Amino acid sequence: MHFEPSLILTLILLGLATGFLAGLLGIGGGMIMVPFMTAILSGQGVVSELAIKMAIATSMATIMFTSVSSVRAHQKRGAIRWDLVKGLAPGIVLGSIVASMGVFSVLKGSALALFFAVFVSFSATQMFLDKKPAPTRSIPGPAGLLGAGSVVGFLSGLVGAGGGFISVPFMTWCNVAIHNAVATSAALGFPIALANALGYAVSGLGLTHLPTYSLGYIWLPGLVVIASCSVMTAPVGAAAAHKLPVKRLKRIFASILFFLAGYMFYRGLSA
């Protein structure tokens, strides 16, 4: 694998964009990162099946850094619901470990690409429609939060996203204000990313044909460059979330997600 200036520039731009979107919409950036990272790794000669898995794993690993930067910005505004973080985090860690150390290593990259496409399409549809929750619905008890966290962690581990595509709709469905839901989702991104990244690193050890400087399924050069750039723009996105018309931005972003889902669907079928 050759590290030409164009490759470094591409990773820098990807990091800046995903960091901003992570702070703005509380999505962790994975929905944008995975399709582009798949294309980058494939362009560097990594076989398609492996490229898809490494894109998912590397995307998730960068969210550890993006989430910390985004959380600091949201915390300054007192927007994070730490009671929800405490209730959801145990299930998130459990679901993440099951996904990254078990199911992820067994499934083929093509199946993961198709799974990614389906869930991004679902997320984009929910984001575009902006459905309002029933006014009487509230946050479930400890058992409900444990179950919800497990689902978030598990699905995040399969698609390499920070969980915002499930946790934000779940929280708004339970009548948590959208700004609180986005901020809380950013805080949940860290335990999701940490548990899954460890799982990807362990489950990918011993694999052959990995590109240079890989830790299991995680491609370290991509992680370092993207994480370094994303932490700079995540606070900018978080600040913008409190000023910009987020509903309108979500609809624009949802349209972009449909195109990215289509690309991953194509990669899954052709892998």
Image: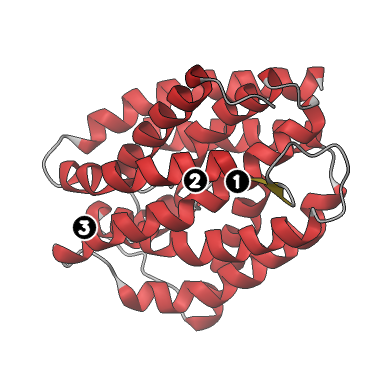
Q: Identify the residue position indicated by label 1 in the image.
A: 220
The residue depicted at 55 percent of the width and 20 percent of the height is: 4
Q: Which residue is nearer to you in this view: 214 or 174?
A: 214
Q: Identify the residue position indicated by label 2 in the image.
A: 224
Is residue 182 rendered to the left or right of residue 143?
left
Q: Is residue 252 above or below residue 211?
A: above
The quarter of the picture where the C terminus appears is top right
Is residue 147 rendered to the left or right of residue 17?
right
* Residue type pointed to by label 3: Ala
Is residue 41 rendered to the left or right of residue 253?
right
What is the secondary structure assignment of the residue under circle 3?
A: helix
* Residue type pointed to by label 1: Leu
Task: Give the alpha-carbon distance from disc 3 to disc 1, as whole Å.
Answer: 26 Å
The residue depicted at 43 percent of the width and 23 percent of the height is: 9
Answer few, some or many: residues within 10 Å of disc 3's Cα (few below 14, many 20 plus, some between 14 and 19): many
Q: Which mark is residue 73?
A: 3
Task: Give the alpha-carbon distance from disc 2 to disc 1, as whole Å.
Answer: 6 Å
The residue depicted at 64 percent of the width and 37 percent of the height is: 55
Q: Position of residue 23 (x, y in %)?
A: 30, 46
Q: Position of residue 136 (x, y in %)?
A: 32, 64
Name which quarter of the figure residue 177 lies in: bottom left
Task: Give the alpha-carbon distance from disc 3 to disc 2, as whole Å.
Answer: 21 Å
Q: Which circle, 3 or 2, is nearer the viewer?
A: 2
Answer few, some or many: residues within 10 Å of disc 2's Cα (few below 14, many 20 plus, some between 14 and 19): some
Label 2 close to label 1 by CB (< 8 Å): yes
